[in-house]
Image: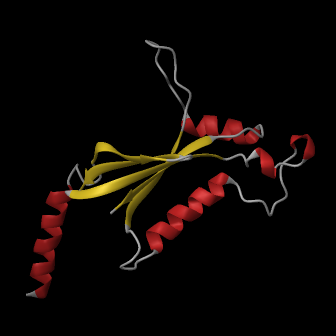
Amino acid sequence: TVTEMKQVVSAAAEVLNAGHADKLTITGVLGRGTYGVVYSGTWRGLDVALKTVIFSSQPPSSLQSAGGAPPPSSATTAYEVAVNEAAVATSLTHRNVVATYRYDFKVMAARQEEGALLEVDVDSALANAIGNGGAVDFKLYLVQE
């Protein structure tokens, strides 16, 4: 029956995805630009490109007002641009547009000295930086065909 076939397909999908559904293997660098790097890799058995973009929650200095004051609310921050790129990339479906399979944002932290442990409480660091008017650096990952 149709119900039994759906159950078999669902069970097979669970087995295939168990533990390795989002494992991404980087195999090389395809290119570098001003804001990031594009890597070649494999994801779920597919050859993919991994686009990475580094950005800050603070707007560029060219958008800031005199005296370092925050820009007007109409100014677009790099964070907003990156979020929009991820949203548009994952929602577009067209034969002439590269498909985006997955995206992720990671908070970037400064490296510790060699041999020292780095413990970062991301939620606290993010809240502290934003609460104090500071910038937080992020990295956007786009897994694309």
Position of the C terminus by quadrant: bottom left
* Picture coordinates of residue 91, whole percent (x, y): 46, 73
Which of 81 and 31 lies nearest the eye of the viewer? 31
Residue 10, picture quadrant: bottom left
Residue at image position (14%, 73%) is 9
- Can you give x and y, in whole percent of width and height, for residue 45 in the image? 19, 57
Q: Is residue 21 found left or right of 66 in the rendered image? A: left
Q: Residue at x 62, y 35 (%)?
A: 125
What colour scheme does the image use? secondary structure
Quadrant position of residue 28: top left
Decide if residue 30 is on the left or right side of residue 42.
right
Tally the numbered discs.
Answer: 0
Name which residue lies at 40% across and 77% down: 93
- Hey, which residue is sitting farthest left in the picture? 1
In the depicted view, which residue is nearer to us: 87 or 41?
Answer: 41
Q: Give the residue displayed 16% in from the left and 59% down from the top.
A: 16
- Vertical side of 65 occupied by 113: above or below: above
Work out which quarter of the rendered image holds the N terminus and state it.
bottom left
The quarter of the displayed image where residue 4 is located: bottom left
Q: Position of residue 100 (x, y in %)?
A: 39, 65
112 lies left or right of 10: right
- Pinpoint residue 55: horizontal percent, then vertical percent: 60, 46
40 up-or-down from 86: above or below: above
Furthest-right residue in view? 66
Hey, which residue is sitting farthest bottom in the picture? 1
Q: Is residue 58 above or below residue 145?
A: above
